[in-house]
Amino acid sequence: MKKYKQILLKYLSFFSLATNFSFFVSCNHQQQEQKAIVNFVENSNKDQYLKISLYENKSAFYISEIGLKRLTKRIQDNLFFGPEIMFLKQININKQIKLFQDDRKLTGFFSSNTQEIFINSEFYENIDNEDDRIELLYQLIFHEYIHFLDSVYFSNYGNNFKVKGKIYNDFFIDNINKLLKTDTKMDYEKVSDIINENHLFNKLTLKEILDKVNKEKNKLDFNFENTSFFPKNTDPSIVIEDVNYYYNYEEFIAREAFKYFYKEKENNLSLNSDTFLREWLRVADVKKKDKKVVIEKIYAPYVLFDNNDLSNNENVKKFANIFLKAMNYGKNISGIFIDDQTKLNNLNQVINSRNFNLVKFIGYLDNQKVNALVFKNKKESNLIKIPIIYNTFDQFKFFNDQKYYSYYSSEFLDIELIDKNYLPKLWTDYNNNGKIEENELKEINNFSDKFNDNYYPSSFRSFFKNLDNYNFINFKDKKINQKE
Ligand SMILES: [Zn+2]
């Protein structure tokens, strides 16, 4: 096997990098506008498509327009996503933003303030085959997309589990820890053929690492010099560069989700460029055989299965269910988005533009006949209709069992106008007369016993804490709650 250099490939979310958005600002006002070669790759459905832009960049990959369509198809068919995908503003490939210029090893990140994914392929060696380039981009996008899920669902809670300025739902964090058995001590003797004694997990349990890295008061005071991260037959020069980076919950969640939910496609990517292979190396001895990653032996106790089978498995399903629950899967209202037009302009500056009072909704319905969500106007006490559009893009294929239809609301609701004591209802115009009639209304299932759990939809995002003024609503405890 070809020797590879020590590299720390980075894919981050914007949140972990900076606590305010001025980080984005470039001083170089001379900078020329970089041209997009392809904008907005359309899906077969003209109204619902993924917004991907490829930028002209001589030192990076080129993907043909057909290739980009294949990438879109790969995302649509296999990414772990729900109806929130309609609110991802854009995926930018090879756009030269300042962050990439400052950190030459950065290959991708999710910007929570502009709700975009940025991918930089400059760092990778040339890859001849377009299918391999597509797979590489897809892997990077997959990782960044989990950061998007994180911002929409996992970290939009007002209290609970605090992670360095970011607040996670602690049920979500605890369930992940339990299922991965992160407090298990490694039995080194059993795996000494694969790893050296100085391997990270032989020094601390994963839970100890996570606690040290994420709890604000605990500092990682452990000396990581000469601590190994990978199996011993891999390049021994690899030592831990940044445990704080890999094991902050934000990164950890994205990497674990990618490890189990990414469905591999045959490819010729090398150890240097195959991020799937690299993720597995930190828990198992893995090789690439017949264009696929094969587990030779698992050495860390923090893996969802103990055989060498990467395919679907009961624990992987349980793991996915932890994520689905946090994504409010099955709830009539599963997510709330404010009117957010915040953009990065051509000078790499963030232009803030948010209206916290205007919101749109996403959710799941068990039929395709519902016409609108209904709220009550607080002044005139008449009902307000918010029309919905069923997703055709979102097939939610992860389990191949289409239990729900997902939708997004097509018009904004002004939360200042509504009576917060009136619980939202679903309206189905059974007699097609366009009028809301009492027997056509059904209370949303969010507050039913089945869905009365530890998760709830909210328009809050961790990122808002950095703003001077913000407002949000959530549906919790049988109420519409608002922060003003
Ligand atoms: Zn990341």
Image (cartoon, grey):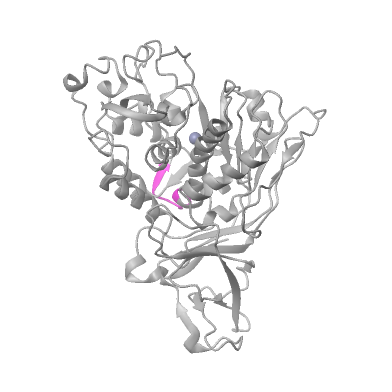
Residue visible at 23% across and 35% down in the picture: 307
Q: Viewer-proximal residue, 334 or 477? A: 334
Percent x, y for residue 107? 57, 29
**Above-or-below relation of 5 to 429:** above
**Above-or-below relation of 106 to 180:** above
In the figure, is residue 279 to the left or right of 156? left
Total numbered circles: 0
Image quarter for residue 61?
A: top right
Q: Viewer-proximal residue, 401 or 129? A: 129
Residue visible at 58% across and 43% down in the picture: 70
Residue visible at 34% across and 15% down in the picture: 227
Residue visible at 16% across and 19% down in the picture: 189
Is residue 161 in the magenta section? yes
Q: Which residues are magenta?
A: 154-162
In the figure, is residue 172 to the left or right of 431? left
Q: Quadrant of the C terminus?
A: bottom right
Percent x, y for residue 75? 53, 46
